[in-house]
Image (cartoon, rainbow, N blue to C red):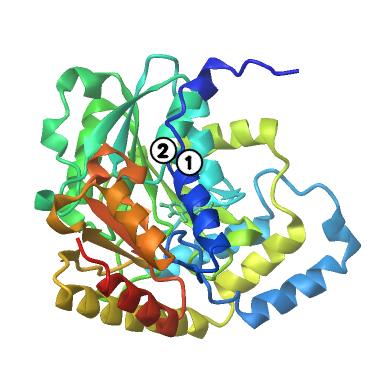
Protein backbone atom coordinates (compact mmCIF):
# COMPACT_ATOMS: atom_id res chain seq x y z
CA UNK A 1 0.00 0.00 0.00
CA UNK A 2 1.02 3.55 -0.61
CA UNK A 3 0.21 5.90 2.27
CA UNK A 4 -0.42 9.56 1.99
CA UNK A 5 2.12 11.56 3.96
CA UNK A 6 1.14 14.12 6.56
CA UNK A 7 0.98 17.79 5.64
CA UNK A 8 4.13 18.52 7.62
CA UNK A 9 6.12 16.19 5.39
CA UNK A 10 4.63 17.72 2.28
CA UNK A 11 5.80 21.11 3.53
CA UNK A 12 9.45 20.02 3.62
CA UNK A 13 11.66 21.83 1.12
CA UNK A 14 12.79 19.67 -1.82
CA UNK A 15 15.88 17.61 -1.04
CA UNK A 16 18.35 19.17 -3.44
CA UNK A 17 21.08 16.73 -2.64
CA UNK A 18 19.12 13.86 -4.22
CA UNK A 19 20.16 15.28 -7.58
CA UNK A 20 23.82 15.26 -6.50
CA UNK A 21 23.59 11.73 -5.13
CA UNK A 22 22.19 10.51 -8.42
CA UNK A 23 24.82 12.26 -10.48
CA UNK A 24 27.56 11.02 -8.16
CA UNK A 25 26.52 7.40 -8.76
CA UNK A 26 26.36 7.97 -12.50
CA UNK A 27 29.85 9.53 -12.56
CA UNK A 28 31.29 6.77 -10.35
CA UNK A 29 29.80 4.13 -12.68
CA UNK A 30 31.89 5.64 -15.47
CA UNK A 31 34.94 4.62 -13.40
CA UNK A 32 35.79 8.18 -12.32
CA UNK A 33 37.37 8.46 -8.89
CA UNK A 34 35.04 10.56 -6.71
CA UNK A 35 36.44 13.13 -4.28
CA UNK A 36 33.69 14.24 -1.94
CA UNK A 37 34.03 17.72 -0.52
CA UNK A 38 30.31 17.74 0.07
CA UNK A 39 29.44 16.56 3.54
CA UNK A 40 30.91 18.18 6.63
CA UNK A 41 31.92 15.02 8.40
CA UNK A 42 35.46 14.86 9.83
CA UNK A 43 37.83 12.40 8.18
CA UNK A 44 40.07 12.47 11.28
CA UNK A 45 39.25 9.66 13.71
CA UNK A 46 37.86 10.01 17.23
CA UNK A 47 40.90 10.36 19.54
CA UNK A 48 42.11 7.02 20.90
CA UNK A 49 41.63 7.76 24.62
CA UNK A 50 37.93 8.41 23.97
CA UNK A 51 37.57 5.14 22.05
CA UNK A 52 39.32 3.26 24.89
CA UNK A 53 36.96 4.76 27.44
CA UNK A 54 33.95 3.58 25.43
CA UNK A 55 35.38 0.05 25.23
CA UNK A 56 35.65 -0.09 29.01
CA UNK A 57 32.25 1.47 29.58
CA UNK A 58 30.54 -0.97 27.26
CA UNK A 59 31.71 -3.91 29.41
CA UNK A 60 29.92 -2.54 32.46
CA UNK A 61 26.35 -3.90 32.86
CA UNK A 62 25.21 -0.77 34.69
CA UNK A 63 25.58 1.01 31.37
CA UNK A 64 23.26 -1.41 29.59
CA UNK A 65 20.11 0.04 31.13
CA UNK A 66 17.91 2.97 30.16
CA UNK A 67 19.87 6.12 30.82
CA UNK A 68 18.38 9.15 32.59
CA UNK A 69 16.64 11.36 30.07
CA UNK A 70 18.48 14.49 31.22
CA UNK A 71 21.83 12.73 30.99
CA UNK A 72 24.22 11.35 33.60
CA UNK A 73 24.92 13.97 36.24
CA UNK A 74 28.62 13.35 35.66
CA UNK A 75 28.28 14.13 31.97
CA UNK A 76 26.35 17.34 32.61
CA UNK A 77 28.88 18.28 35.26
CA UNK A 78 31.75 17.70 32.82
CA UNK A 79 29.93 19.85 30.28
CA UNK A 80 29.48 22.57 32.90
CA UNK A 81 33.20 22.50 33.75
CA UNK A 82 34.15 22.53 30.09
CA UNK A 83 31.95 25.57 29.41
CA UNK A 84 33.29 27.39 32.45
CA UNK A 85 36.89 26.73 31.48
CA UNK A 86 36.36 27.75 27.86
CA UNK A 87 34.00 30.73 28.25
CA UNK A 88 34.21 31.69 31.94
CA UNK A 89 30.46 31.24 32.49
CA UNK A 90 28.91 28.96 35.13
CA UNK A 91 25.90 26.73 34.56
CA UNK A 92 24.23 24.53 37.16
CA UNK A 93 24.39 20.92 35.91
CA UNK A 94 21.14 20.21 37.78
CA UNK A 95 18.89 22.52 35.82
CA UNK A 96 20.80 24.63 33.31
CA UNK A 97 22.21 21.80 31.19
CA UNK A 98 20.58 18.97 29.30
CA UNK A 99 22.40 16.30 27.33
CA UNK A 100 21.43 15.84 23.68
CA UNK A 101 21.59 13.00 21.18
CA UNK A 102 23.67 15.37 19.06
CA UNK A 103 22.86 19.06 18.84
CA UNK A 104 20.67 18.43 15.77
CA UNK A 105 18.25 16.65 18.06
CA UNK A 106 18.02 19.67 20.37
CA UNK A 107 17.54 22.07 17.47
CA UNK A 108 14.82 19.89 15.95
CA UNK A 109 12.97 19.47 19.26
CA UNK A 110 13.08 22.93 20.80
CA UNK A 111 10.18 24.37 18.74
CA UNK A 112 7.92 21.57 20.00
CA UNK A 113 8.35 23.01 23.47
CA UNK A 114 7.76 26.68 22.67
CA UNK A 115 6.12 27.19 19.29
CA UNK A 116 2.38 27.09 18.65
CA UNK A 117 0.89 26.89 15.17
CA UNK A 118 1.14 30.33 13.59
CA UNK A 119 4.03 31.53 15.77
CA UNK A 120 7.14 32.85 14.05
CA UNK A 121 10.64 31.44 14.27
CA UNK A 122 13.49 33.55 12.89
CA UNK A 123 15.64 31.36 10.67
CA UNK A 124 18.88 32.34 8.90
CA UNK A 125 19.34 31.62 5.19
CA UNK A 126 21.67 30.07 3.99
CA UNK A 127 21.71 27.67 6.92
CA UNK A 128 21.74 24.20 8.35
CA UNK A 129 18.27 22.95 7.28
CA UNK A 130 17.12 21.79 10.73
CA UNK A 131 16.18 25.29 11.99
CA UNK A 132 13.49 25.54 9.33
CA UNK A 133 12.44 21.90 9.46
CA UNK A 134 12.04 21.87 13.25
CA UNK A 135 9.85 24.95 12.87
CA UNK A 136 7.68 23.30 10.20
CA UNK A 137 7.22 20.17 12.33
CA UNK A 138 5.97 22.32 15.20
CA UNK A 139 3.50 24.12 12.91
CA UNK A 140 5.43 27.38 13.18
CA UNK A 141 6.26 29.85 10.42
CA UNK A 142 9.91 30.37 9.48
CA UNK A 143 10.72 34.02 8.95
CA UNK A 144 13.84 34.11 6.81
CA UNK A 145 16.76 36.27 7.89
CA UNK A 146 19.04 36.60 4.83
CA UNK A 147 22.78 36.27 5.49
CA UNK A 148 24.50 38.54 3.00
CA UNK A 149 28.14 39.00 2.15
CA UNK A 150 27.90 42.78 2.58
CA UNK A 151 26.84 42.21 6.19
CA UNK A 152 29.55 39.58 6.78
CA UNK A 153 26.86 36.90 6.76
CA UNK A 154 25.18 38.23 9.89
CA UNK A 155 21.40 38.79 9.77
CA UNK A 156 20.26 42.39 9.50
CA UNK A 157 18.23 42.56 12.69
CA UNK A 158 16.86 46.01 11.89
CA UNK A 159 15.20 44.64 8.77
CA UNK A 160 12.88 42.32 10.73
CA UNK A 161 9.42 43.90 10.88
CA UNK A 162 8.01 44.69 14.31
CA UNK A 163 4.82 42.64 13.64
CA UNK A 164 7.04 39.60 13.11
CA UNK A 165 9.14 40.25 16.22
CA UNK A 166 5.97 40.47 18.30
CA UNK A 167 4.91 37.00 17.17
CA UNK A 168 8.39 35.47 17.37
CA UNK A 169 9.05 32.64 19.80
CA UNK A 170 12.58 31.57 18.81
CA UNK A 171 15.48 33.06 16.87
CA UNK A 172 18.07 30.62 15.54
CA UNK A 173 21.62 31.78 15.02
CA UNK A 174 24.82 29.84 14.38
CA UNK A 175 28.36 31.22 14.75
CA UNK A 176 30.92 30.09 13.70
CA UNK A 177 28.56 29.56 10.81
CA UNK A 178 27.84 26.64 8.54
CA UNK A 179 27.90 27.06 5.52
CA UNK A 180 29.47 30.55 5.28
CA UNK A 181 32.21 30.08 7.94
CA UNK A 182 31.42 33.57 9.25
CA UNK A 183 32.01 34.45 12.89
CA UNK A 184 30.12 36.93 15.09
CA UNK A 185 31.51 39.46 17.52
CA UNK A 186 30.23 40.58 20.89
CA UNK A 187 28.33 43.59 19.57
CA UNK A 188 26.23 41.35 17.34
CA UNK A 189 25.30 39.07 20.24
CA UNK A 190 24.49 42.13 22.36
CA UNK A 191 22.11 43.38 19.70
CA UNK A 192 20.47 39.93 19.51
CA UNK A 193 20.05 39.68 23.27
CA UNK A 194 18.56 43.13 23.69
CA UNK A 195 16.09 42.44 20.87
CA UNK A 196 15.12 39.12 22.45
CA UNK A 197 14.59 40.72 25.85
CA UNK A 198 12.51 43.51 24.30
CA UNK A 199 10.25 41.14 22.34
CA UNK A 200 10.42 38.21 24.80
CA UNK A 201 11.65 35.46 22.52
CA UNK A 202 14.18 32.66 22.91
CA UNK A 203 17.58 32.86 21.25
CA UNK A 204 18.88 29.46 20.24
CA UNK A 205 22.57 29.69 19.41
CA UNK A 206 24.07 26.69 17.61
CA UNK A 207 27.76 26.52 18.48
CA UNK A 208 28.74 23.21 16.88
CA UNK A 209 31.96 24.77 15.55
CA UNK A 210 33.08 26.54 18.72
CA UNK A 211 36.50 24.83 18.73
CA UNK A 212 37.24 24.87 15.00
CA UNK A 213 38.77 28.33 14.92
CA UNK A 214 41.98 29.56 13.36
CA UNK A 215 42.23 32.99 14.95
CA UNK A 216 40.58 34.37 18.09
CA UNK A 217 38.52 31.70 19.91
CA UNK A 218 34.84 32.54 19.27
CA UNK A 219 32.84 33.78 22.26
CA UNK A 220 29.70 32.23 23.68
CA UNK A 221 26.40 34.11 23.59
CA UNK A 222 26.59 33.87 27.38
CA UNK A 223 29.55 36.22 27.35
CA UNK A 224 26.91 38.89 26.83
CA UNK A 225 25.11 40.31 29.83
CA UNK A 226 21.48 39.31 30.10
CA UNK A 227 21.85 36.26 27.83
CA UNK A 228 20.78 33.86 30.55
CA UNK A 229 17.40 35.58 30.58
CA UNK A 230 16.58 34.49 27.04
CA UNK A 231 19.16 32.16 25.50
CA UNK A 232 20.07 28.53 25.06
CA UNK A 233 23.27 27.38 23.37
CA UNK A 234 23.64 24.06 21.60
CA UNK A 235 27.01 22.37 21.89
CA UNK A 236 28.21 19.26 20.15
CA UNK A 237 31.06 16.82 20.55
CA UNK A 238 30.68 15.89 16.88
CA UNK A 239 33.08 18.31 15.21
CA UNK A 240 35.38 19.15 18.13
CA UNK A 241 36.25 15.53 18.91
CA UNK A 242 35.45 13.93 15.54
CA UNK A 243 32.49 12.12 17.11
CA UNK A 244 29.72 12.69 14.56
CA UNK A 245 28.57 9.08 14.62
CA UNK A 246 28.43 8.86 18.40
CA UNK A 247 25.43 11.19 18.76
CA UNK A 248 26.30 13.27 21.79
CA UNK A 249 26.01 16.95 22.61
CA UNK A 250 24.43 19.19 25.22
CA UNK A 251 22.54 22.42 25.65
CA UNK A 252 23.25 25.07 28.27
CA UNK A 253 21.16 28.06 29.16
CA UNK A 254 18.12 29.58 30.77
CA UNK A 255 16.47 27.21 33.23
CA UNK A 256 12.96 27.42 31.85
CA UNK A 257 14.14 26.85 28.26
CA UNK A 258 16.19 23.82 29.36
CA UNK A 259 13.17 22.56 31.27
CA UNK A 260 10.88 22.86 28.23
CA UNK A 261 13.33 21.06 25.96
CA UNK A 262 13.84 18.41 28.64
CA UNK A 263 10.10 17.81 28.84
CA UNK A 264 9.89 17.09 25.12
CA UNK A 265 12.85 14.76 25.37
CA UNK A 266 11.43 12.80 28.33
CA UNK A 267 8.46 12.04 26.17
CA UNK A 268 10.17 11.11 22.92
CA UNK A 269 13.60 9.66 23.63
CA UNK A 270 15.26 7.86 26.46
CA UNK A 271 18.60 9.61 26.50
CA UNK A 272 22.09 8.76 25.30
CA UNK A 273 23.61 5.29 25.77
CA UNK A 274 25.49 5.66 29.05
CA UNK A 275 28.69 4.16 27.71
CA UNK A 276 28.71 6.95 25.10
CA UNK A 277 28.16 9.48 27.88
CA UNK A 278 31.19 8.08 29.71
CA UNK A 279 33.21 8.50 26.53
CA UNK A 280 31.80 12.04 26.33
CA UNK A 281 33.07 12.73 29.85
CA UNK A 282 36.48 11.52 28.72
CA UNK A 283 36.33 13.83 25.69
CA UNK A 284 35.37 16.91 27.72
CA UNK A 285 37.65 16.35 30.70
CA UNK A 286 40.55 14.38 29.22
CA UNK A 287 43.59 15.38 27.23
CA UNK A 288 42.70 18.26 24.87
CA UNK A 289 45.89 18.24 22.78
CA UNK A 290 44.20 16.38 19.92
CA UNK A 291 41.70 19.21 19.51
CA UNK A 292 44.56 21.54 18.75
CA UNK A 293 46.30 19.00 16.52
CA UNK A 294 43.14 18.56 14.49
CA UNK A 295 42.59 22.31 14.33
CA UNK A 296 46.08 22.68 12.90
CA UNK A 297 45.39 20.05 10.27
CA UNK A 298 42.23 21.87 9.14
CA UNK A 299 44.10 25.17 9.22
CA UNK A 300 46.77 23.85 6.90
CA UNK A 301 44.08 22.60 4.51
CA UNK A 302 42.25 25.92 4.70
CA UNK A 303 45.39 27.91 3.90
CA UNK A 304 46.18 25.73 0.93
CA UNK A 305 42.62 25.70 -0.47
CA UNK A 306 42.05 29.44 -0.06
CA UNK A 307 45.36 30.29 -1.69
CA UNK A 308 44.80 27.93 -4.59
CA UNK A 309 41.22 29.09 -5.21
CA UNK A 310 42.28 32.73 -5.14
CA UNK A 311 45.08 32.03 -7.58
CA UNK A 312 42.46 30.49 -9.88
CA UNK A 313 40.48 33.72 -9.66
CA UNK A 314 37.73 32.56 -7.29
CA UNK A 315 36.19 34.97 -4.80
CA UNK A 316 36.56 33.31 -1.42
CA UNK A 317 35.09 34.37 1.91
CA UNK A 318 38.14 33.89 4.13
CA UNK A 319 37.26 31.35 6.83
CA UNK A 320 38.36 32.33 10.34
CA UNK A 321 36.60 29.23 11.69
CA UNK A 322 34.78 25.98 10.74
CA UNK A 323 36.05 23.45 8.21
CA UNK A 324 34.18 25.04 5.30
CA UNK A 325 35.17 27.38 2.53
CA UNK A 326 32.34 29.47 1.06
CA UNK A 327 33.09 30.55 -2.47
CA UNK A 328 31.34 32.63 -5.15
CA UNK A 329 30.59 30.74 -8.35
CA UNK A 330 32.45 32.15 -11.37
CA UNK A 331 30.59 34.55 -13.69
CA UNK A 332 27.48 34.35 -11.49
CA UNK A 333 26.67 30.85 -12.73
CA UNK A 334 23.89 29.34 -10.63
CA UNK A 335 25.26 27.03 -7.99
CA UNK A 336 23.58 23.81 -9.19
CA UNK A 337 24.82 24.24 -12.73
CA UNK A 338 28.33 24.97 -11.47
CA UNK A 339 28.52 22.04 -9.02
CA UNK A 340 26.82 19.74 -11.55
CA UNK A 341 29.37 20.52 -14.23
CA UNK A 342 32.31 20.10 -11.82
CA UNK A 343 30.98 16.74 -10.66
CA UNK A 344 30.20 15.63 -14.18
CA UNK A 345 33.63 16.49 -15.55
CA UNK A 346 35.94 15.87 -12.58
CA UNK A 347 34.27 13.61 -10.02
CA UNK A 348 34.67 16.31 -7.35
CA UNK A 349 31.57 16.75 -5.18
CA UNK A 350 30.87 20.31 -4.02
CA UNK A 351 27.75 21.57 -2.30
CA UNK A 352 25.68 24.14 -4.22
CA UNK A 353 24.91 27.11 -2.00
CA UNK A 354 21.22 27.03 -2.91
CA UNK A 355 21.00 23.71 -1.02
CA UNK A 356 21.24 25.82 2.16
CA UNK A 357 18.50 28.23 1.09
CA UNK A 358 17.65 30.87 -1.49
CA UNK A 359 20.28 33.28 -0.24
CA UNK A 360 22.99 30.67 -0.71
CA UNK A 361 22.51 30.97 -4.48
CA UNK A 362 25.65 32.11 -6.29
CA UNK A 363 27.94 30.29 -3.87
CA UNK A 364 29.31 26.81 -3.32
CA UNK A 365 30.73 25.17 -0.22
CA UNK A 366 33.89 23.12 0.08
CA UNK A 367 34.27 20.90 3.15
CA UNK A 368 37.90 20.51 4.25
CA UNK A 369 37.24 16.98 5.41
CA UNK A 370 39.59 15.05 3.15
CA UNK A 371 43.39 14.89 3.26
CA UNK A 372 45.54 17.69 1.92
CA UNK A 373 46.69 15.48 -0.97
CA UNK A 374 43.12 14.79 -2.00
CA UNK A 375 42.29 18.48 -1.75
CA UNK A 376 45.24 19.30 -4.00
CA UNK A 377 44.05 16.68 -6.47
CA UNK A 378 40.48 18.05 -6.35
CA UNK A 379 41.58 21.63 -6.97
CA UNK A 380 43.85 20.52 -9.74
CA UNK A 381 40.91 18.87 -11.49
CA UNK A 382 38.65 21.90 -10.89
CA UNK A 383 41.28 24.22 -12.37
CA UNK A 384 40.94 22.44 -15.73
CA UNK A 385 37.19 23.06 -16.08
CA UNK A 386 36.34 26.02 -18.29
CA UNK A 387 33.38 28.29 -17.60
C1 LIG B 1 27.36 19.47 12.22
C2 LIG B 1 26.42 20.50 12.70
C3 LIG B 1 25.70 20.31 13.88
C4 LIG B 1 26.01 19.13 14.76
O1 LIG B 1 25.19 18.16 14.77
P1 LIG B 1 25.26 16.97 15.79
O2 LIG B 1 23.85 16.57 15.83
O3 LIG B 1 25.74 17.49 17.12
O4 LIG B 1 26.17 15.95 15.22
C5 LIG B 1 24.86 21.30 14.33
N1 LIG B 1 24.75 22.45 13.65
C6 LIG B 1 25.44 22.68 12.54
C7 LIG B 1 25.32 23.99 11.86
C8 LIG B 1 26.28 21.69 12.02
O5 LIG B 1 26.94 21.92 10.88
- Whichever of callouts 2 and 1 sits on the residue coming sooner in the sequence is 1
Of the pair 378 and 102, the residue shown nearer to us: 378
> At which x and y percent is residue 286?
59, 78
Residue 87 appears in which quarter of the rendering?
Answer: bottom left
- Residue at left offset 55%, top offset 68%: 31
| Label 2 CB-ligand 1 distance < 8 A | no
**Residue depicted at 23% across the width and 79% down the height:** 308
Which residue extends farthest front?
Answer: 30
Classify 295 as above or below 101. below
Q: What secondary structure is marked by label 1?
A: helix
Tell me where residue 311 appears, x and y as whole percent.
16, 78
Residue at mark 1: C-beta within 8 A of ligand 1: yes
Seen at 70% across and 46% down, the residue is 271
Q: Quadrant of the C terminus?
A: bottom left
Q: Residue at x 32, y 79 (%)?
A: 380
From this view, report whether residue 109 is shown above or below residue 59.
above
The N terminus lies in which quarter of the figure?
top right
Q: Is residue 360 left or right of residue 56?
A: left
Q: Percent x, y for residue 16?
A: 42, 41
Q: Position of residue 353 (x, y in %)?
A: 30, 49
What separation in Å lies between label 2 and label 1 (alpha carbons)? 6 Å
Camera-side residue of 147 and 48: 147
Label 2 with label 1: CB-CB less than 8 Å: yes
Residue underneath mark 2: 131
On the image, numbered disc 1 is attached to which residue? 107
Few, some or many residues within 10 Å of mark 2 (<14, 14–19, 20+): many
| Residue 223 in sight in this render | no
Mark 2 or 1, closer to the camera: 2
Residue 203 makes an appearance in the image: yes
Left or right position of 31 against 62 = left
Amino acid sequence: MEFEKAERLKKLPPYLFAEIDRKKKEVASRGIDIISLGIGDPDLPTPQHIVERLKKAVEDPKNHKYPDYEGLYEFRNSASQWIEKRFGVKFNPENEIVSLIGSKEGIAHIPLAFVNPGDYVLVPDPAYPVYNIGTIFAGGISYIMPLRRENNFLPDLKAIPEEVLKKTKIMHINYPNNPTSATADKSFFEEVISLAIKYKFIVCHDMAYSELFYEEPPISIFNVEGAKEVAIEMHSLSKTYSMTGWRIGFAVGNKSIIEGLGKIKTNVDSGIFQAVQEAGIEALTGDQTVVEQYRNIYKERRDMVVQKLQSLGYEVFYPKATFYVWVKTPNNIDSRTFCGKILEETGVVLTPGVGFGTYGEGYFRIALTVSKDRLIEALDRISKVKF
